[in-house]
Image (cartoon, rainbow, N blue to C red):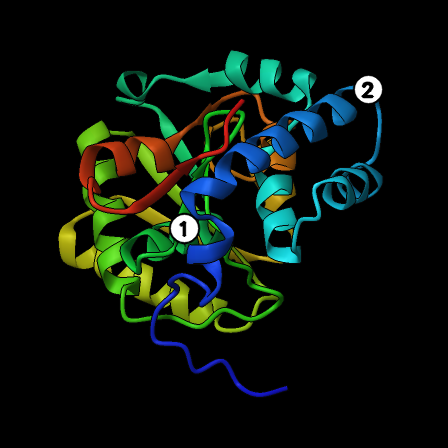
Amino acid sequence: MSPDIRKHRGAHPEDKTLFAAEQLRALRTAVSELSWLLSRGYTMKAALKLVGDHHALTERQRLAVSRAACSDQSKARRTETMMPAENINGEGLIIDGFNLIITVEAALSGGLIMICRDGCLRDLSSVHGSYRSVNETNSAIRLIGESIAALRPKSVVWMLDKPISNSGRLAKRIRDMAAENGWNWTVQVTFNPDNDIAASGKIVVSSDGPLLDRVERWLNFNRYLIDARLAALWLIDLSC
């Protein structure tokens, strides 16, 4: 396998074609159909194959549809447990670190960002066991930090996946920038951060659907940050 030498986390070369305006109607229909099947107990794998084959979607389009869709039950629960940004003052936040930073890096790099059925903003990047910082990493951390500071939380804990390579380096980078700016952040690198996040009792910052289905309170921080600070980005609406 060749090493990852990307300098940006931007769009795939085919994305402008795969997600052009004339494709969006079919993609939204696919999201709606996939969500309908998930609401009735179909597994993601089986339902995505059925919908993807029906609409002759490419693998990358199927990835987008799968990330944008969710069952009616998940949508209702996520809506019920989502905290308004104005209620974060004085609360403790816990951040799904790779999930957050990769989306902000992608947005800053000109990558595709999707409005999903549950209101979250998601990208199409994947880690697959290895993370490599890009030119936008420092800008992403700074933008996240400034946006969190405006919410005035009591404390902030970042959780990073220890099995993902370079997680320690990213942790150091986050700690260093927090120290430089006086942000009250703690960064932890653990083997199973999802379980730690779900059990923390803090307000969760993540757009990971299965994790959001497990937590009691969460903040749609990607949406808050991008709406407030990143007007110029490639955003498509796949909500339904």
> Which amino acid type corresponds to the residue marked 2 in the rendered image?
Arg
Q: What label does residue 159 carry, if any?
A: none
**Residue ID for mark 1:** 112
Within 10 Å of disc 1 (Cα), the crowding (few <14, some 14-19, many 20+) is: many
Where residue 222 sits in the image (x, y, percent)?
A: 37, 37
| Image vertical order of residue 213 relative to residue 43, above or below | above
Out of 61 and 137, give the one closest to the viewer.
61
For the residues labelled 2 and 1, the Cα–Cα distance comes to 29 Å
Residue under circle 2?
40
Tell me the quadrant of the picture where the N terminus can be found: bottom right
For the point 75% across and 20% down, which residue is it?
39
The image quarter in which residue 237 lies: top left
Query: Is residue 30 at least partly visible in the picture?
Result: yes
Q: Label 2's element? A: loop
Residue 214 x %, y %: 65, 28
Whether residue 80 is situated above or below residue 142 in the rendered picture: above
Left or right placement of residue 28 versus residue 85 in this view = right
Marker count (numbered):
2
Q: Residue 235's x, y, as percent?
A: 35, 41
> How many neighbours does mark 2 have within 10 angstroms: few (below 14), some (14-19), or many (20 or more)?
few
* Nearest to N terminus: mark 2 or mark 1: 2
* Left-right relation of 238 to 90: right
Q: Residue 156 vs residue 51: left or right?
A: left
Give how far across and how far down residue 87 sits, in percent: 31, 16
Which structural element holds mark 1?
A: strand
User: Residue 116 or 201: which is nearer the viewer?
Assistant: 116
Whether residue 196 can be seen here: no
Q: Residue at x 48, y 63 (%)?
A: 14
Q: Amino acid at mark 1?
A: Leu
* Nearest the eye: 172 or 126: 126
Query: Which image quadrant: the C terminus?
Result: top right
